[in-house]
Image (spheres, helix red, strand yellow):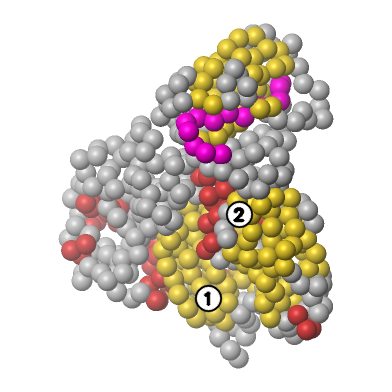
Amino acid sequence: MSKTCPTPDRPLRGRLSSDKAEYSIDEVVELTYSTTFPSEKNWVALYRHPDKGPTDQGKSPAPSLWKYAPGNSGVVAFWDHDLLAEGTYLAYFLHDNGYAWLAPPILFTIGTTAVRGVEFLAPRFSLRNARAGVGYSTTVSATAATPRLSPVTYALARGSEWVELSTDGEITGCPRDEHVGTTVLEVTASDGEGTATAEVSITVRAREAHLVDELVVATWNQWYGGREVNGHHAKELRFLLESGVDVVGIQESYGDGAVRLARALGWHHVQTSYDLGIVSKYPIVEEYRVCAGEPSASPDEDEAGKSGPNRPLAIGARIAVGGPHQRDVLLWTTHLWYTPYGPHLACHDGRTCEDILSGENRRRMEAEQIAMVLADRITRLDGTDDVVVMTGDYNAPSHLDWTGAASGAHCGYSVEWPSTRAMEAVGLRDTYREVHPDPIADPGVTWSPVKKRDEYDPRKKEPQDRIDFIHVAGRVTVVESITYVEGTPRPYIKDKRYHVDNEWTSDHAAVITRLAWLPR
């Protein structure tokens, strides 16, 4: 029989069951339901475990599959095998198109996948820096996962006298002067049947030092909040832990990507739109917005921020990474308009340069509006250690890439793409090109690790381009800048599901840049 999860506090008015706890590949999954609270819009949702479903009976990410369960009782059958990959699932019986439970969820597996024990998402990772003499708190509560229903508990196998770790993964303490340096912890996670271990490090800075001298920045399109890939939540957390990023500008967050990840890791976040988000290890002390209708902040967003005059063209956050002396990072992120796509006009349609640049008008105007706001911020950097960082998916290549010398890689075209030119004009530097100045030797392709053929006409190759950027202004040098993809993703082909078990959850490569402040 399938396993039943613990009953929540609120009373339930139904039952969900299955005659089996394990199904073979291509076998129909049949779930029997009954309720004294019927509705034509009651529904059964399947979530890949241990992805986050509606565990708190609140809105959650989209399930792998769902079907309506009308009336007082019945059977729902799932036979969509291309959507149900081998693995472990939780089935929820939910009320009236909402997320209130009608019954405790049940656990079942598809295929012969062995039930793995508790595991850390990354075997070693770093937490945000601490400062001597200042209280410190963070969490590792989401850094380990188990396919079992039992909770994960944490403990210190090896630690430091200043660090305390609760069983639910909360780290607290107050380092002293003698702790300046790197504190290395050996943290264990247990699910009652097994134990895993990870090496966790915390850098302790001196009282008079800045909290960081280097900052790792990423820009990352989440691809519909990661929902195109099974187990996306855990895989996204693994990326953040393994890559060592400190701050991330996010596009296609799907309304909850930033808040979901930040809450799991104990980070700070801005989630002001359906599309854009920011996550940061370090405190966010101020938020900004550039809206489509005007370059000022607006609290309103029509159509959940997807379009209209109040659609945020860019969002920003002032992130405090200083110490006794002021040092802030003003991090911005944008997702410029997506159509028409210039490389398609060039490589698929053979349009003139005039036509291609005409198609860039909306993106150009958006970029110039954002750049106008950033220019004002950049003029205030003189005499400070503050830094302006612009991240984003521009939906267009760079003028530094489609040069005459590199035209052979771009269907014979040389194009002065205006969006990146607008950023350069106000004093922002392209961090990837600063380290890799030759676009032929280092193209830095971010679009796309999974889309190699045109989505609607697979006879055409999808142009592979660098359309995701990190630009910077201020007293910092670029130590390194890379594109980042985990593993070797399987391709996305429209109406197929080849990509659903990729380790990398996006259709873009991320860009990761390490910045270092210049000494005074």
Q: Which residue is at the front of the view, 229 or 116?
A: 116
Picture coordinates of residue 220 (x, y %)?
49, 56
* Quadrant the C terminus occupies: bottom right
Amino acid beneath label 1: Leu
Is residue 109 found inside the magenta-colored segment of the image? yes
Query: Within 10 angstroms of label 1, few (less than 14), some, or many (20 or more) residues?
Result: many
* Quadrant the N terminus occupies: top right
Compared with 341, 122 (above or below) is below
Q: Which residue is at 73% across, 54% downward?
A: 154
Residues drawn in magenta: 101-115
Q: Which residue is at the front of the view, 102 or 448?
A: 102
Amino acid beneath label 2: Phe
Q: Which residue is at the front of the view, 149 or 455?
A: 149
Is residue 469 found inside the magenta-colored segment of the image? no
Considering only order in the chain, which callout, 2 or 1, is on the residue closer to the N terminus?
Answer: 2
Could you tell me which secondary element the residue under label 1 belongs to?
strand
Q: Which residue is at 79% across, 83% downward?
A: 177
Could you tell me which secondary element the residue under label 2 belongs to?
strand
* Residue highlighted by disc 1: 515
Q: Is residue 82 left or right of residue 320?
A: left
* Residue highlighted by disc 2: 120
Q: Nearer the viewer, mark 1 or mark 2?
A: 2
Compared with 259, 73 (above or below) is above
